């Protein structure tokens, strides 16, 4: 139960951080998008740490997923959503933690330009993955509530 609640919390947090970092909701109010960018700038140091935690949690979920993968014939929707949760946690965790990981790996070397180009190449995937994270958090919550009610998905 704790694992499911933590999955929901991590998905919501990294989804919302990803949306703020990507400039808010598309087609949203210009002032709201600017406010989201300002909040994202203030949370940037914490986004890297949250990204690392989400990455570690996703890898741990991948290890746990090996145990429940055999249940795909009994509860296919739950297993498929669990696979999607793990993938989104790992990928979005990597995107959010990228600046922190790059800084740790690059050290004081002159490879900062290459790292910036690499970040620019993965940045377009941040918004769709953030939407997916929020949607998966809602789906996981619904599946959890239905499972507690005795419905098998």
Image (cartoon, rainbow, N blue to C red):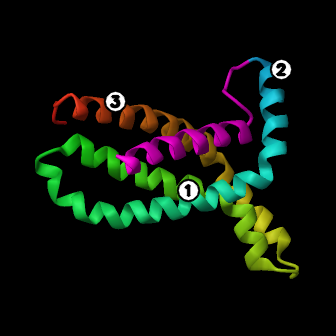
Q: In terms of image quadrants, where is residue 32?
A: top right
Q: Is mark 3 on a helix, strand or loop?
A: helix
In reply to whether residue 67 is colored magenta, the answer given is: no
Sooner in the amino-acid sequence: mark 2 or mark 1: 2
The residue segment tinted magenta is 1-28
Q: In terms of image quadrants, where is residue 39?
A: top right
Q: Residue 54 carries which label?
A: 1
Question: Alpha-carbon distance for marks 1 and 3?
Answer: 21 Å
Sooner in the amino-acid sequence: mark 2 or mark 3: 2
Q: What element carries label 1?
A: helix
Sooner in the amino-acid sequence: mark 1 or mark 3: 1
Main SS of the magenta segment?
A: helix
Position in image of residue 89 (x %, y %): 50, 53
Question: Alpha-carbon distance for marks 2 and 1?
Answer: 29 Å
Q: Residue 31 carries which label?
A: 2
Relative to 70, residue 43 above or below: above
Q: Residue 74 carries which label?
A: none
Instruction: Give 28 or 77, whichever is nearer the viewer.
Output: 77
Q: Is residue 91 left or right of residue 63?
A: right
Q: Residue, x 17% and y 30% (percent of image)?
A: 151
Relative to 128, residue 64 above or below: below
Q: Residue 142 carries which label?
A: 3
Mark 2 or mark 1, whichever is nearer to me: 1
């Amino acid at each position: 139960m704790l694992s499911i609640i933590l999955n929901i919390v991590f998905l919501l947090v990294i989804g919302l951080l990803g949306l703020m970092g990507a400039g808010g909701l598309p087609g949203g109010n210009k002032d709201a998008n600017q406010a989201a960018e300002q909040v994202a700038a203030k949370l940037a140091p914490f986004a890297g740490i949250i990204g690392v935690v989400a990455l570690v949690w996703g890898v741990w979920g991948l290890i746990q997923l090996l145990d429940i993968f055999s249940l795909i014939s009994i509860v296919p929707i739950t297993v498929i959503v669990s696979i999607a949760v793990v993938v989104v946690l790992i990928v979005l965790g990597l995107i959010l933690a990228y600046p922190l990981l790059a800084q740790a790996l690059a050290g004081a070397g002159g490879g900062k330009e290459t790292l910036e180009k690499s970040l620019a190449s993965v940045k377009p995937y941040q918004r769709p993955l953030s939407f997916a994270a929020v949607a998966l958090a809602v789906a996981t919550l619904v599946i959890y509530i239905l499972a507690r009610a005795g419905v098998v998905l």
